[in-house]
Image (tube, grey):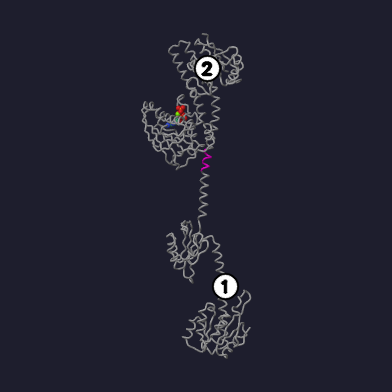
């Protein structure tokens, strides 16, 4: 494909875009005002794989260049209408033609001219008279360079496309900072995370970033060119809110580029939400597990009570008739017989034995009946004081001092006051019996968070955990304490270390039943300084309508209904 | 004034006997014992007591059932009833007798003094 030299050439304004596979031959425009020179040039390149165009002056060269857009121009310098330097200058000034490669041809063999030409953007220089082969070789070389450059540009474009696609589809926000810390690029995720559009982000300087930690990290990475990351960062957003992110700042360490930093922002709010939900679910699980355990304990307790209740009724029936017979028999004999002194004492002893037996059976019945509660909001300190009043006299007689330390800020909550008094009475009596004579009874109450070592076995069964804020009542004595072997059995019905007839062994089991019905706990332990301590724990919160004692359990619901 | 009549019903003969001896010993009451529910019904009609002591739990017929049947009879409407029970505790009845849902209950074991006080109260003496 060639044109005869000298003839005006018309061409399509632009070469068709090259498609991969089919290679369009490079288009070369030969420019010289001397037809002979044009011919020589033409001859030296003709027959090779080029499309050749010719122009016989500067103006024509510019015209053809604009319309045909050749890849390379062999440009004579000395031309009458417009010299080559000017042609080259105009070409480079017009962005349509700026990428056309220029090789100057001139008789001038002057280094300053060559430099001038190269400064104007030419790629090479051939001195006349030239050897056709040299011209061909240089054109070949430059065409190859041009082709490679184009391919490179194409690759680059493709790479950029891929990069953009990756950046656009990334969940992480990516922000590029140049060596000065100015934002050079931004992906859509970064726009979303920052709540700003790219335009706004692109105007940012390093100093605009908040918080300071982020700014400092980015600056450090810029200087040190070492990657850094931050686990948790609250990033302010465009709308005034903030967003938790994880940040990675990586240096752009290609030596060919001015060093910059890439910031990768990972949105943690979803993770936070999931974590929060998980935590909440976990809390709910823990709570319902706790409630379940309490409910289960109370069911077990209820079942025990029921079987004990049946047993108690049977025993009472079997035992009380004989007791009644003996009682009425003795009463009758006392009426109708004149006894001497000794017989009278015998009768007295028999009467006492009878009432002891009756007490045991009655205790059993009492024990099996502690089911319903009459709940009213009550200040626990009042119940303590009233119970204490009942044993005051005996304490004084036994020379036992009483120390009380009752906190004034304990919230009222529903209690069965009578039953609560029974509890305190039992505990005071036990302490008193343990000390016998001379000692100190210490009674403390408050509402505070319990320590781990205050959670006894019963407290654990009640679902109390260290750190729970609970009503605490401690009753301490200076008695001998509890034999370690007995510790596990104190609350068993009928367990007593007292002499025959002096204790039923039901005091603590009744006490525990009552406390359990109030969703509380009672544990007994020895004190390091000697003596024993009973520790009662209750939940302080006001109870709801269907949950009178402050715990969710079937037992309590029944109780509430019964009383409604 | 003729003696007031008291019928004692309990499946335990020794108990009715002890109750009877104590009541008779005062010289104020005419007392009869029965130890089976069916006999008690018959005795109530023949003997026409002013007051009947009934054991709540008996093998053949409970005291409450006996009272229920007797109350149906208009001729026996004046009879007063008291229930003896082993499973009501003293705390619930207090000393002596107690009213539980309109009925008089006396907890076993009953002492002579408590027994006499309850009888006097029931008979309006
Ligand atoms: N403060 C204490 N110090 C030492 N031992 C105690 C104390 N409290 C209770 N115990 C022991 O626990 C046992 C059981 O107590 P519980 O109150 O159940 O029955 P009890 O006191 O023996 O009989 P009751 O209560 O009928 O008088 C006691 O016999 C005693 O051995
Ligand atoms: Mg006790």
Give residue A50's quadrant in the image.
Answer: bottom right
Left or right for B49, reference A408: right
Indicate the position of residue A66 as horizontal and vertical percent values. Answer: 56, 80
Q: Is residue A186 above or below residue A70?
A: above
Side (left or right) of A401 relative to A130: left
Residue A491: x, y in percent? 48, 32
Q: Which segment is the magenta one?
A: A287-294
Task: Kindly report the distance in space between the C-alpha atoms of the residues bearing marks 2 and 1.
Answer: 118 Å
Q: Secondary structure at mark 1?
A: helix
Residue A436 versus residue A451 in the image, above or below: above
Q: Position of residue A293 (x, y in %)?
A: 52, 39
* Secondary structure beneath label 2: helix
Which disc, if any, is residue A154?
1
Asked whether, in this view, residue A70 is left or right of residue A406, the answer is: right
Q: On the same chain: label 2 and label 1?
A: yes
Q: Nearer the viewer, mark 2 or mark 1?
A: 1
Image marks 2 and 1: residues in contact by CB distance under 8 Å: no
Report in which chain the residue with disc 1 lies. Answer: A
Q: Is residue A497 visible?
A: no
Quadrant in which residue A340 is drawn: top left
Q: Earlier in the sequence, mark 2 or mark 1?
A: 1
Give the prevailing secondary structure in the magenta stretch: helix
Chain of residue at mark 2: A
Label 2, on which residue? A325
């Amino acid at each position: 494909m060639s044109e005869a030299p000298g003839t005006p050439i018309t061409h399509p304004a632009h070469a068709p875009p090259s498609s991969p596979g089919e290679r369009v031959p490079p288009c070369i425009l030969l420019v010289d005002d001397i037809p002979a020179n044009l011919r020589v040039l033409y001859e030296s390149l003709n027959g090779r794989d080029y499309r050749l165009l010719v122009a016989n002056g500067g103006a024509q060269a510019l015209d053809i260049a604009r319309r045909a857009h050749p890849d390379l121009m062999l440009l004579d310098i000395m031309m009458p209408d417009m010299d080559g330097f000017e042609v080259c200058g105009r070409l480079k000034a017009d962005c349509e033609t700026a990428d056309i490669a220029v090789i100057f041809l001139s008789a001038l063999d002057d280094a300053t001219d060559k430099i001038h030409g190269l400064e104007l953007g030419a790629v090479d220089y051939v001195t006349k008279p030239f050897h056709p082969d040299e011209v061909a070789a240089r054109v070949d070389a430059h065409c190859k360079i041009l082709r490679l450059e184009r391919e490179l540009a194409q690759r680059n474009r493709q790479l950029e496309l891929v990069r953009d696609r990756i950046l656009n589809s990334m969940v992480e926000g990516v922000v590029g900072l140049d060596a000065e810390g100015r934002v050079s690029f931004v992906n859509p995720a970064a726009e979303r995370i920052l709540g700003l559009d790219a335009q706004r982000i692109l105007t940012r300087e390093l100093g605009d970033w908040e918080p300071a930690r982020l700014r400092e990290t980015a600056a450090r990475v810029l200087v040190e060119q070492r990657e850094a990351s931050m686990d948790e960062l609250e990033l302010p957003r465009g709308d005034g809110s903030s967003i938790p992110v994880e940040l990675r700042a990586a240096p752009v360490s290609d030596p060919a580029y001015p060093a910059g930093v890439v910031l990768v922002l990972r949105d943690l709010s979803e993770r936070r939400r999931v974590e929060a939900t998980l935590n909440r679910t976990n809390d709910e699980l823990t709570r319902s597990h706790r409630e379940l355990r309490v409910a289960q304990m109370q069911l077990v307790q209820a079942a025990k009570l029921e079987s004990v209740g049946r047993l108690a009724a049977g025993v009472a029936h079997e035992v009380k008739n004989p007791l009644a017979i003996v009682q009425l028999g003795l009463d009758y004999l006392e009426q109708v017989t004149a006894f001497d002194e000794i017989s009278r004492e015998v009768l007295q002893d028999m009467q006492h034995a009878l009432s002891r037996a009756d007490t045991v059976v009655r205790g059993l019945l009492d024990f099996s009946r502690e089911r319903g509660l009459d709940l009213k909001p009550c200040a626990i300190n009042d119940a303590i004081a009233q119970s204490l009043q009942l044993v005051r006299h005996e304490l004084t007689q036994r020379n036992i001092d009483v120390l009380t330390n009752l906190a004034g800020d304990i919230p009222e909550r529903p209690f069965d006051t009578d039953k609560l008094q029974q509890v305190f009475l039992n505990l005071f009596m036990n302490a008193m019996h343990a000390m016998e004579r001379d000692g100190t009874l210490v009674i403390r109450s408050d509402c505070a968070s319990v320590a781990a070592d205050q959670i006894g076995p019963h407290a654990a069964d009640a679902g109390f955990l260290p750190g729970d804020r609970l009503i605490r009542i401690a009753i301490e004595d200076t008695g001998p304490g509890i034999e370690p072997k007995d510790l596990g059995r104190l609350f068993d019905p009928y367990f007593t270390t007292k002499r025959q007839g002096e204790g039923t062994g039901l005091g603590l089991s009744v006490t525990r039943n009552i406390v359990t019905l109030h969703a509380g706990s009672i544990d007994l332990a020895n004190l390091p300084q000697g003596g024993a301590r009973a520790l009662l724990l209750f939940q302080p919160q006001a109870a709801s309508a269907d949950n009178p004692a402050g715990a969710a359990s079937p037992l309590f619901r029944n109780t509430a209904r019964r009383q409604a | 004034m003729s003696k007031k009549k008291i019928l004692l019903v309990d499946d335990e003969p020794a108990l009715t006997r002890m109750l009877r001896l104590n009541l008779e010993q005062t010289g104020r009451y005419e007392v009869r014992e029965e130890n089976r529910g069916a006999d008690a019904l018959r005795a109530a009609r023949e003997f026409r007591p002013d007051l009947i002591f009934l054991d709540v739990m008996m093998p053949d017929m409970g005291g409450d059932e006996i009272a229920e049947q007797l109350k149906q009879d208009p001729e026996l409407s004046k009879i007063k009833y008291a229930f003896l029970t082993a499973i009501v505790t003293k705390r619930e009845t207090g000393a002596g007798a107690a009213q539980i849902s309109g009925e008089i209950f006396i907890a076993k074991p009953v002492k002579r003094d408590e027994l006499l006080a309850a009888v006097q109260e029931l008979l309006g003496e």
